[in-house]
Amino acid sequence: MKFNDIRKMAKGMGINTYRMKKKDIIHAIQKREQNIECYGTDRVKSCNEKTCIWRDDCLKCMESF
């Protein structure tokens, strides 16, 4: 998902995204949805959330570490 799409999603949930990085915005969305704030964390190594909308991007993000 593109950064601007993520920002739009967050703003639609009432989240102020000013000066926030992508990872922080996604964590805020996850928190608002009462989900685990796991995007871009070590949890990806054992993640079984196959339907997570962040999954593909999260896996790519963690490949660089």
Image: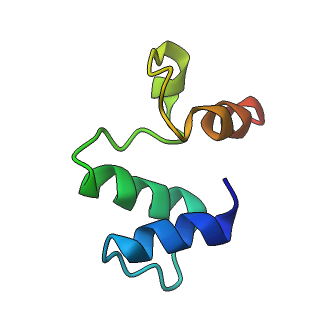
Q: Is residue 61 left or right of residue 33?
A: right
Q: Position of residue 39 (x, y in %)?
A: 49, 42
The one of 54 and 61 positioned closer to us in this rendering = 54
Outermost residue to the left: 34
Q: What is the tally of numbered marks visible in this picture?
A: 0
Q: Residue at x 36, y 61 (%)?
A: 28
Q: Quarter-wise, where is residue 23 in the image?
A: bottom right
Q: Residue at x 43, y 69 (%)?
A: 10
Q: Is residue 50 above or below residue 7?
A: above
Q: Is residue 61 left or right of residue 11?
A: right
Q: Is residue 7 above or below residue 52?
A: below
| Coloration of the structure image | rainbow
Q: Position of residue 5 (x, y in %)?
A: 61, 66
Q: Is residue 43 above or below residue 37?
A: above
Q: Position of residue 19 (x, y in %)?
A: 53, 83
Q: Quarter-wise, where is residue 15 in the image?
A: bottom left
